[in-house]
Image (spheres, rainbow, N blue to C red):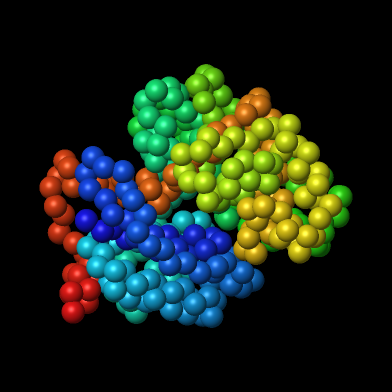
Amino acid sequence: MRLGVLDIGSNTVHLLLVDARPGAKPVPYASHKRALSLVQYLDGDGNITDEGQTELIEFILEAWEFAAKHRAKDLLAFCTSAIRESTNGAAVLERVQYETTISLTELTGDEESAMTFFAVRRWHGWGAGTILNLDIGGGSFEIAQGANELPDLAHSVPLGAGRLTRDWLIQDPPTAKSVRDLRKHIKATMKEAVVETQKLGSPHIVTGSSKTFRALARITGAAPSSMGPYVKRELHLSDLGLWSQRLSAMSSADRLHLPGVSVARAQQVLAGALVAQTALEMFKVQTMQISPWALREGLILRRLDQLVFDGPLDPPAHVGKLTNSATH
């Protein structure tokens, strides 16, 4: 069956269509996305403005039509920290449902961390042993560790690359003081989650998921995405420390010339590098593996598991409309 996953993130809004069936690996079929940073549409009180809501609704309607055109049978729609932490998040979700008929599931930070870990576990398998997974989003940073399919401990802290860039790295390129201050803030904010996670003992492998980690690995010499997901990609602390220094001296325009850095990521890749470096230092990790699967894949796999154990589920109202639209 063809499944759609609509991801309303902090940096982008993204619809991914995959062909999937229980027991098989989901195969990407098509993708439709837009660089929409909802945090840029926050007013002084933390509300998402009418303009931001309109942009969001326009994309969701585009995604709905795209999924229908490509005969999607089911649509999973979710949102993360951008809406979760906005003052008027509940009202935004109500407006989205009213104007599009699509209900966005609001994931908590811990749920986001756990579902990302679930995907990483499925990718690496049981042979990986205990996994510590780190994931840098636009609004939050997730830490999860465990020996099973779901983590024994999952944390989400407000250290997303987009958030930190907006709040701490005002100038472009940033001042040396702002970088030093941000490093201190990251370490202080991350400390409690790191200490709690370390009580579980040392993991067998440390993995990094998310586009930020993939971009950092590419900058430091990992294989490009064009070589496919089965190429082993690693990120080394020694390389990351060197590139954090280099990135701090570059403007966002200069970073665009680096491999793996898109227009949407150029401004915030430094903040992502500082979070990644601090995390590896605090966990005393020299090398991490880059996982090609993350939150979207976790939700898809969880949906397929429901089909196996519970049988076909009654689709929500908008899925029926998708199916009808696709068959005419």
Image quadrant in which the C terminus is located: bottom left
Residue at the top extreme of this rendering: 201
Residue 287 percent coordinates (x, y): 62, 29
Q: Position of residue 41 (x, y in %)?
A: 58, 72
Quarter location, residue 326: bottom left
In the image, is residue 132 above or below residue 77?
Answer: above
**Which residue: 43% across, 48% down?**
295
Q: Is residue 192 left or right of residue 311?
A: right
Q: Position of residue 31 (x, y in %)?
A: 41, 63
Name of the residue lying farthest toward the right? 176
Q: Nearer the viewer, residue 11 or 91?
A: 11
Q: Quadrant of residue 255?
A: bottom right
Q: Is residue 106 left or right of residue 183?
A: left
199 sits left or right of 307 in the view: right
| Residue at 32% over, 56% down | 18
Q: Quadrant of residue 92?
A: bottom left
Q: Is residue 102 visible?
A: no
Question: Where's the N terminus, which quadrant?
Answer: bottom left
Residue drawn at point x = 47 percent, y = 28 percent: 131
Q: Nearer the viewer, residue 230 or 317?
A: 230
Above-or-below relation of 311 to 4:
above
Q: Residue at x 67, y 52 (%)?
A: 259
Q: Is residue 35 visible in this depiction of the protein?
A: yes
Q: Is residue 294 above or below residue 97?
A: above
Horizontal and vertical percent position of residue 68: 27, 72
Q: Is residue 277 above or below residue 60?
A: above
